[in-house]
Image: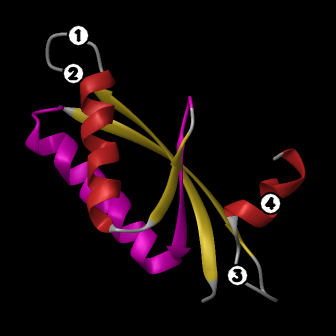
Amino acid sequence: MAEALVSVQMIPKTLNGEDSIPYVDEAIAVIDQSGVNYHVGPLETTMEGELSELFAVIEKMNQRMHQLNCPSVISQVKIYSRQDRKASMTELTKKYR
């Protein structure tokens, strides 16, 4: 499949009701370490790449949350792909830049 855009919002449940932002930071670190192109937004992070690779990153993000002892995590995912060419964050947002 051609390159796709995948936006993900991680909502980790913490053991004692701690602030979830440090956990979200860890999830974003997983994306950073993956080497895919990404953009952090205020409510979600968008990644650009091969769909199977991006799904693998999301799986690692969820695994990281469990390594940090989150009893549960919700991953809200949005996918954008095109049949005729690769999906691009730059292309989709260029009129706003």
Q: Nearer the viewer, mark 3 or mark 1?
A: 3
Q: Residue at x 37, y 58 (%)?
A: 58
- Do residues under tags 1 and 4 come within 8 Å of each other at their CB atoms? no
* Residue where numbered disc 3 is placed: 86
Name the residue rendered at 18%, 32% in the picture. 70
Q: Residue at x 25, y 59 (%)?
A: 60
Q: Nearer the viewer, residue 32 or 3?
A: 32
Q: Earlier in the sequence, mark 3 or mark 1?
A: 1
Q: Earlier in the sequence, mark 3 or mark 2?
A: 2
Residue 26 lies left or right of residue 81; in this view the side is left
Which residue position holds label 4?
92
C-alpha distance separating marks 3 and 1: 41 Å
* SS at circle 4: helix
Q: Which mark is on residue 14?
A: 2
List the residue tagged with mark 1.
17
- Residue at the image position 80 percent from the left and 60 percent from the top: 92
In the image, taking residue 78 as reference, residue 97 lies left or right, namely: right
Q: Look at the image and tell me in which quarter the N terminus lies.
A: bottom right
- Which is nearer the N-term, disc 4 or disc 3? 3
Q: Position of residue 73 (x, y in %)?
A: 32, 37
